Amino acid sequence: MQYKKIIKDALPSPEQLKKMDEEAAERRKESWEKLESRADEISIIDFHTHIFPKKIAKRALEHLTEGCRTIPFTGGTEEELRASMKEAGIGLSVSLPVITNPEKVIRINFSAAVQNEKVDETGILSFAGMHPAAENYRALLNTIKRLGFKGIKLHPDFYRIPFDDIQTKRIVDYASELDLIVVTHAGTDIGLYPPVFCTVDSIVNVVKDVRPAKLVAAHMGGWNNWDEVLDKLAGMDLWYDTAFSIGEIPWDAPDANQYHFHQLEDEAFVELVHKMGVDRVLFATDSPWAEQKDYVNRIDGMPLSKDEKRRIFAGNAKRLLGL
């Protein structure tokens, strides 16, 4: 009986829970407003990064590296991303959680919401993660919106559910109704290939059927499907990020030669930017799988105008984020 009283007293009451929720929401709001107040000082935004809790970062990277045979450039922690950002002159990074199990959606997103209580200090803004197989997807998306997230991340290859499957379409549709940004992995994932679960055709289908206002196709619309992206996605109402699409990536993927895995050459990248529309391109690296400073230097050295670089590096992201 005494133990029951101790446990009962240790649990917060509904009133206390409500107060804690309101206080956390206020911290997120204040932190974002502080970031907004110095938005003019942010000249580079990395729209696609990944971080892991310190206690599991090493194990997580080892597991992912085993699949893709790619050497990460940091240890995947918040501290190491912040150090990388400082070296590269990046003022804000968007962290994209990948959820592989629908049962983990709530836990991971509440943890990510805590990250956003200090975005003005860390320069790291976390999106939420979603899983198409979650039956209560509307309630989960409503919670994501209530927690103040700017957007969600989808990775069809991890779920093994096609991007244009009805389960995913309904996620994109309701997220768009809530004015959330939707970032999806697009094209080949070298650690999970084959097959491809977010093909260029599947993106075309979703855009035509759902008409999302803020859909970002990562990896320039479809990694390793560059010609198809150019032929089928140009002119569509869509955003693109530059993550893991340029430069020299040190990998030892066993299927790299068989499937002709390759990054975009500078000339092809610039052509893709112009065909897709420079106002739709978001600077991104996929850190820790690409080096932020190297990406900044590479794009800065490309034959793009000063205004085009300004938009790619931060202007477009600010517009999309409402920053």
Image (cartoon, rainbow, N blue to C red):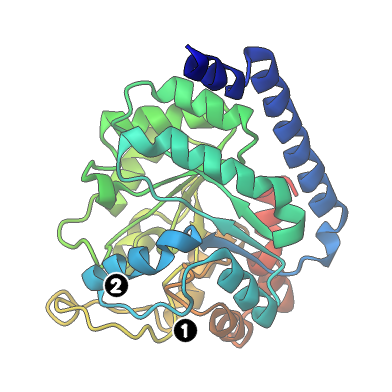
Circle on res. 22: none
Tag 2: amino acid: Thr
Tell me if 116 is positioned left or right of 38 in this view: left
Circle on res. 266: 1
Tag 1: amino acid: Asp
Q: How many marks?
A: 2
Where is residue 162, by image quadrant? Answer: top left
Q: Circle 2 sits on which residue?
A: 65
Secondary structure of the residue carrying numbered label 1: helix
Residue located at (70% from left, 61% from top):
122
Residue 50 visible in the snapshot? no
Answer above or below: position of 89 versus 134: below
Mark 2 residue crowding within 10 angstroms, few (<14) / some (14–19) / many (20+)? some
What separation in Å lies between label 1 and label 2 (alpha carbons)?
26 Å
Answer above or below: position of 59 versus 20: below
Answer above or below: position of 67 versus 24: below
Residue 269 versus residue 107: which sits nearer the camera?
107
Hey, which residue is sitting farthest right in the picture? 37
Sequence order check, earlier mark of 1 and 2: 2
Answer above or below: position of 163 versus 80: above
